[in-house]
Every structure is written in structure tokens, then in C-alpha cells.
Amino acid sequence: MEQRTYRGEIDAEGLADALMTRFNHGDLMAQMVRGQEGHLMVQIATRQWGWGAARSALSVGIAPVEGGVRVTVGEQRWLDAAASLAVTGLGALVNPLSLLGRIDDIARDVGKLTLPDQVWVAVEHYVDSVGAKLGMSEKQVVVACPYCGVGNPVGVGTCSACGGSLVDAQPVACPNCGFISPRDARFCSRCGVKLGPSP
């Protein structure tokens, strides 16, 4: 399960509608479920395409948080698609011509395995379209002053208690995905890109 928080003028229902529009067609079907306190769940599943076809599902949770939304993507039953591909591969060893009848099924199975990535791309696209940004975790909202230890909001240049400089204590944003990391981090913990100046 992966979770990301986005900050800005972002509407949970608008994001859910965008996911429904993007994934409720072709080999996929999607439905929205409303929970309590504005929580939404978008369930995306593959359609059954005949006897023994692999079926997989993905749940996208959208919860309002202060100043934005938290999106959680959870996978379910991905082994079915992987197992279907493995069976196809074994069958091709015995009879290579059997692949001809399975081309469409193989394409669907590969699509199922990349569905979480497709969902995150759709979420990021919606977030960008409304001007929201990937947010900081609760730990990254405050920067401790290196001189007196008082917590200050991220982005403030001087400590509110002692006036000391907070420039060297500020976290850094990944140039690839925008994820906020501690100042001394060498690599982004989300995408693995090297942080800081190149040697």
C-alpha cells in the first residue's frame, strides 16, 4: 500500500470523479463508495473476459486532511495476473503457436500489473491541473532550530524564539518527484533520485 498527501485547493470528490472517468472503460470498471467524514473510495477492477480469466482489483482511498487530501492506493489479487502470464509462458514452450490465441489476454494481463502506476499518473495529472502540490508529512511541517531547538514552520528563514538562521535546517525537495526529505538525505526516499549537488 502506498500513501501520498497533496496540499492545496484540491477537491476529494473531483479527484474521485477524474479517476472514475479515466478507468471506467475498456478492460476496466470503476465505482465510487462514499464513507464518513468526506472519505471516498474508488474501486478499480478488471472485467472478466471468459472462463478462468484473471481478475484483479485496486482500491484508491481519498481522505480530506487539513489543507488537502491523502490518497492511498492498495493492491488486491495481483498474483492472478502474474500467474496467468506464467501459464501462458509455459504453454508457449510446449506449443509456440498457442501464443497467437493469447495475444489479447497477454496485453490485458500486463496492463493489470501496471495499474497502480497508471493510477498514480492519473492522480498526479489531476493534482497538477488544480494547482495542488505533493505535501509534506507531519514530521516535515516543522523545522527545529539548530541553536535553541524551538520548532518553526518550514520555509521560515529565522527562528521565532532566538532569531538564529534556519537556512541550513530546511528540508530539500526532490527535483524529480517533489517529495520533501531531510536536509542531510542523499537520496529521495520515494523515487531514489540523488539529492543535492553532484560531486
Image (tube, grey):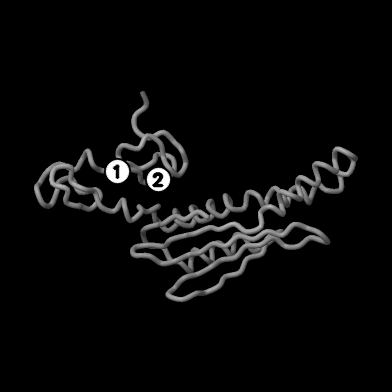
Q: Position of residue 36 (x, y in %)?
A: 46, 76
Q: What is the three-letter code of the residue carrying label 1?
A: Pro
Question: What residue occupies the far left of the structure in this picture?
Answer: 162
**Callout 2: few (<14), some (14-19), or many (20+) C-alpha neighbours within 10 Å?**
some
Q: Position of residue 46 (x, y in %)?
A: 69, 60
Q: Residue at x 58, y 65 (%)?
A: 20
Name the foreground residue: 189 vs 26: 189
Residue lying at the far bottom of the rendered structure: 36
Q: Which residue is mark 2?
A: 178
For label 2, the SS is loop
Q: What residue is at 70 percent from the left and 47 percent from the top?
A: 110
Q: Amino acid at mark 2?
A: Gly
Left or right side of 89 for 175: left
Placement of the C terminus among the 4 image quadrants: top left
Between circles 1 and 2, the one closer to the viewer is 1
Left or right: 90 with respect to 4? right
Instruction: Locate residue 130: give its quadrant.
Output: bottom left
Whole-percent x and y of residue 28? 68, 60
Residue 147 lies in what quarter of the image? Answer: top left
Residue hosting label 1: 171
Q: Nearer the viewer, residue 109 or 25?
A: 109
Residue count near mark 1 (Cα–Cα under 10 Å), binned few <14, some 14–19, many ≥20: many
Residue at the extreme top: 199
Q: How many marks?
A: 2
